[in-house]
Image (spheres, rainbow, N blue to C red):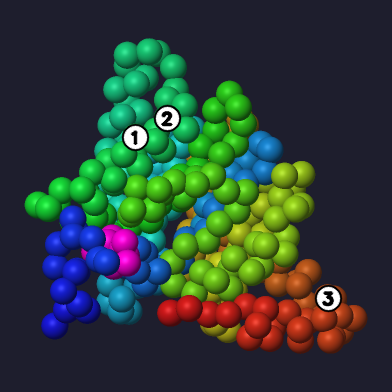
Amino acid sequence: MFRNQYDTDVTTWSPAGRLFQVEYAMEAVKQGSAAIGLRSKTHVVLASVNKANSELSSHQKKIFKVDDHIGVAIAGLTADGRVLSRYLRSECINYSFTYESPLPVGRLVVQLADKAQVCTQRSWKRPYGVGLLVAGLDESGAHLYYNCPSGNYFEYQAFAIGSRSQAAKTYLERKFKTFMSSSREDLIKDALFAIKETLQGEKLTSSICTIAVLGVGEPFHIMDQKSIQELIESSEVKEDEPVADQGTAMQEDQSPEAAPMDI
């Protein structure tokens, strides 16, 4: 029934120094729909896969607006992500009311990490089974953070979480050096390419992905499906052009070693 005798409680350490319940929560993030974030000097783009469970149902929302200068994308247990996004929204409102200025992104991320950490140290609580990519813009520029169920947080240039995210990470690792100088449109196209890597050959359409953009002079907002579809079509045209010239290089990029999948 259990993996071992040390995973029945979140506060029980194993002899190897591990908290298995926390690791199970991190595994829930890996099983969720893929979410991707990348940033330049002036913009941050979030993207997510939002497939419906059946043709008769709608998809679960994976990207949430927190404030005009902050938004999040989630992977894992959507209900937990919805609760945490509401918490973030509340913190932004309280800070704005008290200090009449936007809440710095780094401070909000620390508060979120502290909230997640408490759930790893109380026997009557369970860790949040969701990972969050937090996109923000403040006086120090554009930021992208990843908050883990363990209470850890990291700042990234680009990152991917969720199911089959390793393929997207491989693509981002090849391209990340160009992101800081990229334009808004190029960032969005790179996000679409990264999302496409997680689909394992399935055709990318605007109906199965969501894109959100935040930038200087541009409040956080989710793009409409028509705009996303136009970008997908224009990207596909440009992608098809160099295929004949690059032949061997394309085959190498598509090898299992270049883009491993983890389900």
Inspect this view and state whether residue 20 appears. Answer: no
* Marks 2 and 1 close (CB-CB < 8 Å): yes
Give left or right: position of 20 versus 137.
left
Residue 192: where, in percent of width, then height? 61, 63
- The amino acid at mark 1 is Gln
Vertical order, 182 against 131 (above or below): above
- The amino acid at mark 2 is Arg
Quadrant, the N terminus:
bottom left
Residue 121 versus residue 71: which sits nearer the camera?
121
Of callouts 3 and 2, which one flags the residue occurring earlier in the amino acid sequence? 2
The kind of secondary structure element at disc 3 is loop
Q: Residue at x 58, y 24 (%)?
A: 139
Picture disc at residue 177: none
The kind of secondary structure element at disc 1 is helix
Q: How many residues crowd around disc 3 within 10 Å: few (fewer than 14), some, or many (20 or more)?
A: few
**Residue under circle 3?**
241
Q: CA distance from mark 1 to mark 3?
A: 47 Å
Quadrant, the C terminus:
bottom left
Residue 47 versus residue 75: which sits nearer the camera?
75
**Residue under circle 1?**
111
Vertical order, 198 against 42 (above or below): below
Stretch of the chain drawn in magenta: 16-25
Residue 158: where, in percent of width, then height? 60, 53
Q: CA distance from mark 3 to mark 2?
A: 45 Å
- The amino acid at mark 3 is Glu
Q: Kindly indicate the quadrant of the structure image that contains residue 237.
A: bottom right
Q: Residue at x 44, y 17 (%)?
A: 101
Secondary structure, magenta segment, majority class:
helix
**Residue under circle 2?**
107
Residue 91: where, in percent of width, then height? 31, 29
